[in-house]
Image (tube, coloured by chain):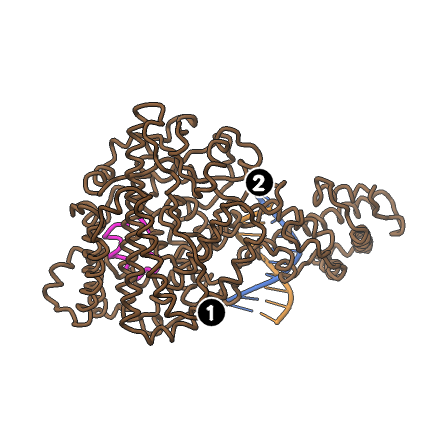
Chain colours: A brown, B blue, C orange
Amino acid sequence: MNLSLTDQNMHNSSECCLEDDKPDVMLPCFRRNMYDEPLASYSSGSIISQLLRKTIHNKRALDESHFYLSSSTAADSGQEDQCSVSSKDSTVEAASPSGHVSTGASLEGEHPMTDHLQAKRARVENIIRVMAGSPNSRQHGDSERSDTDARDTREAREAYRENKRKQRLPQHQENSVGGPANRRPGSSSSDNCNTKDEECHKLKEQLHSMQRLLRQLQEKFLQVYNQEDPEQNDRDETEVAVEHDTMEESTEPRYVSTEDDFERKNSRMTAECKDRMKVVGYLVHQRESQNLQETLKHELSRAVNDCVDKVFKKVSSTGLDRSPQQHMCSSPEMQLSMGADRKSQQVGSTQEQPHAEEAAVKPRSLEYYERSEAQSPQDQTEALSLVVRKPAVTPMSSVTPTVKRPYPVHQTPFQFNYSTPLHDSQILEHLLKYGPHSNFAGLPCMPPSMDRTSPDSVDLPWDTIAMRSKVTSSHLGHHPRPSALGAVTVDNLCLPHVKIECGELQSMAERNPYIFFCLNINVNIQEGLTPSHLKKAKLMFFYTRYPSSNVLKTFFPDVKFNRCITSQLIKWFSNFREFYYIQMEKFARQAIVDGISDVKDMTVSRDSELFRALNMHYNKANDFHVPDRFLEVSEITLHEFYSAISAAKDSDPSWKKAIYKVICKLDSDVPDEFKTSSYL
DNA sequence: AATAGACCTG
DNA sequence: CAGGTCTATT
């Protein structure tokens, strides 16, 4: 999003999530922070200080312009908080940093800060200074740092935890997503690849640094506010606890059946996410410092994401014209897949022998990068995600064509294979020049055979997010899980037809998978409705033609229901019925044409042509024994149509409704076996 | 006005 | 199958 856009659209709630289509227009504040300032290292805290200055200035500016968050908004809590984050964030961010950066410095001198803010700023800056105290030690390799950092962060969290006695904060280890992709110099097959290796590595490390910084910052903030406002803890405790419970309840079942390491890792990520969720939830309630926090987080996130995204874009734009084979890096170590544990299993095989299972895992990152030419700046607006409001972790999954595996929890193997020299990237230059060490792994790599035909919502403009978020939040009362749109909570991967509702999130994740993982942001992407679900729905149709939404919820326990999913399922059954009635009418008319005079001469058996047509539609594989009751109902339906047509009732435009009324009463209970998510 | 369902279309 | 429109219902 460029500056002018920002200024012009301060009121636009979606604006914070928008990025313009001009990849080369750098966000002024970003450029300033990331590039113009020689940021000897991110760990130096200079960027943070800058941000703090900006933030504080902003807060003041907002106060002055009465553009500040209304108290009612700020007072919102609990689920509402989670659900409406996007709008709230937008409010904050729309009025924040980017637009003020240029004037920030001068204004700061003119308008003395309040003592309070000054104190706060001083404290935070001090913290950051301390944090950045040993930047170099952190910069030298993941193995070294993870010990210290993990301990630091854990301690911070422990401290926080003690203030929230009631919370069960699962222990977990720090996930360093990029960790596994350790570079092995020399393993590449060519010099070119060696160079790329190094650059790759540098970028990666840089990302880690930023990641760590952000994490630490969050936790330090936490400490500060704990000391400063201890009673607030108690106040928020209940809210947070509620959040926690809600999340617990909705997320845990999903992992029951998972078995491999990756799943366990994700469980831990869930834990961590919950943890952070609480942290953030707590922070959010600090009305006083909300702007500060939001702005800081936003800016940090943006900076990181922007940085990463642009590099990716640059890299990919030069790399995509290569042949698929060239996308593959000769050294598996260079491949960054989302899960370390998973990597070795998926890398390679996915690309070289994409059969059913691998094909099911459908990375969309290529599409993303193909599009990124035009859209890339949008892709990182998700920076917000850094705020990590969403605790629940579900492996990213995509709608898959797999039918064999009933309800697969697919991990999208977003693999980023190094494949492009990073020579001409301005961003890279900056990174390499100013960054402590650039490091990056670079390109999405996809099996050529991957199904990329499925329409998705990647093209959705970001403004639809805000639009949709309102819709969603109005229904969140029924939602089992708080949804933080602004925090990049991807509720569901919806099938294309519901993309208006939730496609943005899907595409967000699809377009920016690497960001999510690198930043250790866990996107809760519940699988959408899969072909397996469709198949199951069709079989259920043999029992119920008019399932209630409650029934649907009962029988699709592995589906996180939200508005789009529900309507999609309902639509499915609507389509089923349509086909069913069409067949009925068709065969009834045929019977009349055939001169059948008595309905009793019309029966529906398993040999019937009608049944075969129906069976072919709902039970194509013919691996399901259609209940007799369905034959009965079909026969009744056929008779109804026959009678109505015979009586010339079909002259009435709504003559079918009477039939529908009859048929809808013939629903029977769906067997309990269907309740098992792994039924198929 | 919102919703659900049928209907039509691609 | 999904998207849209139309209509009836609340």
Left or right: where does residue A69 sit relative to residue A476?
A: left
Magenta region includes residue A451:
no
The residue at which mark 2 appears reads as: A401
Q: Nearer the viewer, mark 2 or mark 1?
A: 1
How far apart are the two marked residues, 2 and 1, measured between alpha carbons?
A: 37 Å
Please say whether residue A468 is visible from this viewpoint.
Answer: no
Residue A503 or residue A665, whichever sits in front: A503
Residue stretch rendered in magenta on the structure = A1-19
The residue at which mark 1 appears reads as: A242
Please say whether residue A129 is visible from this viewpoint.
Answer: yes
* Coordinates of residue A525 in the picture (x, y in percent): 48, 51
Please tell me which residue is depicted at 22% across the width and 69% down the height of the picture.
A65
Name the chain under label 1: A
2 and 1 marks on the same chain: yes
Query: Could you classify mark 2 by the number of other residues whose Cα lies within 10 Å: few (under 14), some (14-19), or many (20 or more)?
Result: some
Please tell me which residue is depicted at 24% across the width and 70% down the height of the picture.
A66
